[in-house]
Amino acid sequence: DGATDSGSSFQTYDWVKIFQAIRETNPTCQIFGTHKAGVVDGVKLGSTGGVNWIGNEDGYAHDETWSKVIAGENYEDIRSNGYIKGYPDGDTWSVPECDAKMLAGGWFWGPSKQNTLRSMEKLSEMYYSSIGHGATLLLNVSPNDQGTLDENQKQRVLDFGQAIQESFADDLTKKPGVTAYATSVWGNAKEYSPMNVLDAIPEGSLYDDTYWSAADGETTGALEIRFEEPVTFNTISIE
C-alpha cells in the first residue's frame, strides 16, 4: 500500500515499473493507495483510480464522502477531522475503503486479545458509518496460531452478516400502492420518471439500469415516496 517505514527500514518504490507491470498484465486491477505514486516524468500515475484509504482504521467514513479523486494529486492531503473525503469535482473514480479490526486489541491474533472482540453494537455502528456513508468496509479477522479462526470471531462474523440481511429484509417501498413523485423530470420523459426508483432489479442482472433524473439545469430537487398508510422505519438504503 506504499507504506515506507522509517530510519534504516525506509523503503522506496519504483512506481513506474510497478504500475506498468500491473496495467500490462491486469489492466482492470484495482490498485490501493495509488496517490503515493504522484507524477513521474510528466505521467500522472498517482490517483489513477482504484481503491483509496479513508484516513483512519476505525471503520468510519465522513458523512460527506466522494468516490472521486484528481489524477496525479495526493488525496491524503485533503482531510477533514481525520477523514479523507475525496473530491466532488474529481476526474477519476476511486472506491473509498474503511479498514477496521474485529479484535480491538490489534490486527493480529493473540491469547490476550480475545476479550477485545467487537460487540454487535460496535460492528453495526461501523457498518452504518462506512457503507452508510458511501464507502466499503474491510473488516479484518485474525487467524490464530493454528492457522484457523477462533470460534468467537467466526461466530461474530456470521451473526454480523445475518443482522445486516435482516435489517434490509423488509423493503417498505414494495408495499401495494406506493408511488414516487419528484419536483422535476428530465424532459418530462417516462424513461427518467421518479417511479424508476421503485422498480426491481431485472432477474439475472446485478444492477438496475433505470433511474430518475431531474430536469436539465436543475442543481437541487426533491424525491418523495408516498405510502397509502403511515409506516414506521429507522433505516434507509439509497443505491
Image (tube, grey):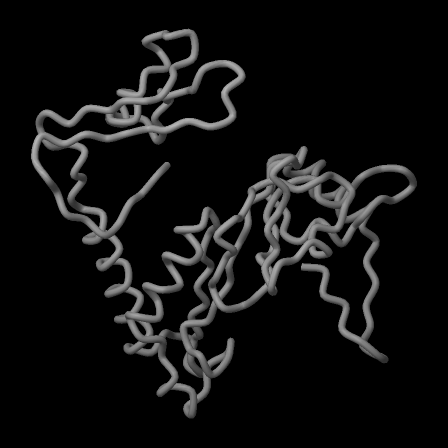
Q: Quadrant of the N terminus?
A: bottom right
Q: Is residue 189 left or right of residue 61?
A: left
State the image coordinates of residue 59 (x, y, percent, origin top left): 47, 64
* Quadrant position of residue 198: top left
State the image coordinates of residue 60 (x, y, percent, origin top left): 48, 61
Report the residue at 37% width, 56% height from top: 128
Report the residue at 38% width, 74% height from top: 148
* Quadrant position of residue 111: bottom left
Viewer-closest of 70 and 118:
70
State the image coordinates of residue 95 (x, y, percent, origin top left): 55, 45
Viewer-closest of 58 and 217:
217
Viewer-closest of 35 and 143:
35
State the image coordinates of residue 146 (x, y, percent, origin top left): 41, 81
Residue furthest out toward the right: 41
Q: Is residue 171 above or below residue 135?
A: above
* Quadrant position of residue 179: top left
Q: Is residue 97 above or below residue 200?
A: below
Residue furthest out toward the bottom: 112
Q: Is residue 237 above or below residue 100?
A: above
Q: Is residue 178 left or right of residue 128?
A: left
Report the residue at 51% width, 63% height from top: 99
Q: Quadrant of the C terminus?
A: top left
Viewer-closest of 233 and 168:
233
Q: How many marks?
A: 0
Q: Is residue 37 left or right of residue 237?
A: right
Q: Is residue 172 left or right of residue 184?
A: left
Report the residue at 44% width, 64% height from top: 139
